[in-house]
Image (tube, grey):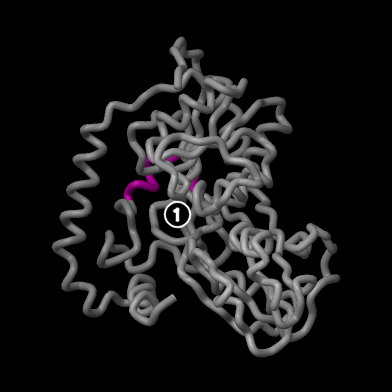
Amino acid sequence: MNRVAEAVVRRWYGRPGLLRLLWPLSGLYGLLGGLDRCRARPWKAPVPVVVVGNVTVGGTGKTPVVAALVAELAARGLRPGIVSRGHGGEHRRPMAVTADSDPALAGDEPVLLAGLCQCPVWVGRDRVAAARSLLAHHDCDVLVADDGLQHHRLGRDVEWVVVDGQRGLGNGHLLPTGPLRESPRRLEAVDAVLINGGHWHHPRGHRFRLVPTAWVRLVDGLSLPLPEGPRGRVHAVAGIGNPDRFFDSLRALGLAPQEHRFADHHAYGAGDLVLSEPWPVVTTAKDAVKLQRLIRSGELADLPAGLDQLWYLAVRAELPGPPLEALARRLTAVPPVDAVVEE
């Protein structure tokens, strides 16, 4: 992450300072967002749709929440599918995603979800088109829209918003003065506000946590239970929305990380892992799907510590009970819709 981006993020989650000069642009951003909501004619899918999204830019723990939600739905006998924008991917038309898909084409988060969830995952810049394609190819009875809160053309039956409990809503301003995609009032209209750790509070919020579960070696998929795996000094590589959360997790596990920060959805090259000290390299599951491509191409063959010392930390979201039970009641109450699903 470059210094300008770091300075902007500090202002977003502190006092806005000179960013106050951008307030007219924030007003325009809010106006355009309101017009988009008013003009949208939502498409109603023939199955219930659950949207899991953010009101802020950057990471909040949304992807593990989606994975945990899909697992919960499957455990209750449902057949979920996932639709996503596929941020960072180069795709233009709807496409199916698997754990072996190229994240440069499909996006890093959809590839990660395809591996974690073992359910149909489709991406598309037009989420309605992606949802239609998914339903045309798979027998799913519920859709989970990953990061679709502001995609108003996709009708939804349930909305969950995930908030980083360390950062909250930042300075409370809309982009670009602050980190907000929508007004804080948007939280009053959603079905659940899920708060990822921290101390930020919302009267309608339900706190959850991300629990580290294992170390996974990228080169061969070997999984080691905690506290086995890397120890002591490590290179910590993170290209996520809030890398501090990852670094703090490593310290809590007793590691001493040297931090290597990259922008969210960073497209890694072999040069990013040219590191002088031959320590193990640890990263996040989201970053791992992109580093896998470098491993397959042979570009990381000269990693100082060796490929057998490149690991990612697997985590699981422990979802609170009340939103899950409310979701189950809502899904049973959604009336069936007769709709023609076509590609």
Query: Would residue 303 be visible to someone looking at this image?
Result: yes
Q: Residue 95 versus residue 301: which sits nearer the camera?
A: 301
Q: In the rendering, at what x and y percent does residue 51 appear?
A: 47, 38
At horizontal 18% and vertical 66% (from top left) the residue drawn is 23
Q: Is residue 84 left or right of residue 284?
A: left
Q: In the rendering, at what x and y percent does residue 326 appear?
A: 57, 34
Q: Is residue 201 left or right of residue 228?
A: left
| Residue indicated by mark 1 | 88
Q: Hey, which quadrant is residue 323 in on the image?
A: top right
In magenta, the rendered stretch is 185-193
Identity, as a three-letter code, of the amino acid under mark 1: Gly
Q: In the rendering, at what x and y percent does residue 204 appear?
A: 47, 48
Q: Is residue 188 magenta?
A: yes
At horizontal 65% and vertical 89% (from top left) the residue drawn is 276
Q: Is residue 223 magenta?
A: no
For the N terminus, the quadrant is: bottom left
Q: Is residue 206 left or right of residue 210?
A: left
> In this rendering, is residue 81 above or below 245?
above
Q: Hey, which quadrant is residue 149 in on the image?
A: top left
For the C terminus, the quadrant is: top left
Q: Residue 298 versus residue 342: which sits nearer the camera?
A: 298
Local secondary structure at mark 1: loop
List the single residue furthest toward the top. Answer: 338
List the single residue furthest toward the bottom. Answer: 277
